[in-house]
Image (tube, grey):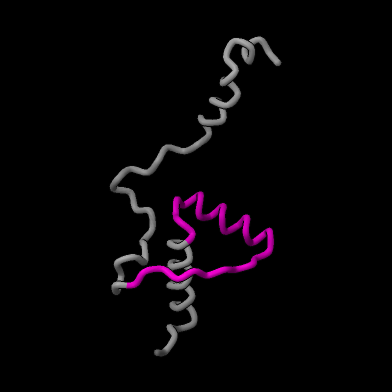
Amino acid sequence: MSADDRKNPLAKWLTKAKAIPAPPAPTERRGRSSVGQKGQGFRQLNLKVSPSSYERIKGLAYRDRLSLVAMLDEMLDLYEKERGALET
């Protein structure tokens, strides 16, 4: 324990907080939400993915400040553009 840690026991914890990015501005886009679109709510979707895919998905969502739901919506849009929408 250094002299600084003894002076302020929260110093180590507070230095970690400096690495957290600032919250988005109220006008900044955070991804769209499915709630309210077409009057639909949410359905639960349980998935198992490899550890590497999990890290990539969480990292990209964090980097772009998107919820996983918003990220999945964008992924579906891109998939449909590439391969065509599902015919209903």
In the rendered structure, which segment of residues is drawn in magenta?
Answer: 40-68
Residue 25 in percent (x, y) is at: 33, 43
In the shown orientation, is residue 74 left or right of residue 13?
left
Q: Nearer the viewer, residue 66 or 80?
A: 66
Of all residues shown, which one is farthest toward the bottom?
88
Q: Nearer the viewer, residue 10 or 52?
A: 10
Residue 41 in percent (x, y) is at: 36, 69
Residue, x 29% and y 74% (percent of image)?
38
In the shown orientation, is residue 79 left or right of residue 36?
right
Residue, x 57% and y 20% (percent of image)?
11
Of all residues shown, which one is farthest toward the right?
1
Q: Quadrant of the C terminus?
A: bottom left
Residue, x 48% and y 66% (percent of image)?
72
Specify the quadrant of the image occupied by residue 3.
top right
Asked if residue 4 is positioned above or below residue 57 in the image, the reply reads above
Q: How many marks?
A: 0
Residue, x 37% and y 44% (percent of image)?
24
Was residue 48 drawn as part of the magenta stretch in this picture?
A: yes
In the shown orientation, is residue 86 left or right of residue 40?
right
Asked if residue 17 is positioned above or below residue 50 in the image, the reply reads above
Residue 83 in percent (x, y) is at: 49, 82
In the shown orientation, is residue 73 left or right of residue 59?
left
Asked if residue 21 is positioned above or below residue 84 in the image, the reply reads above
Q: Quadrant of the N terminus?
A: top right
Asked if residue 47 is positioned above or below residue 83 in the image, the reply reads above
Was residue 5 drawn as part of the magenta stretch in this picture?
A: no
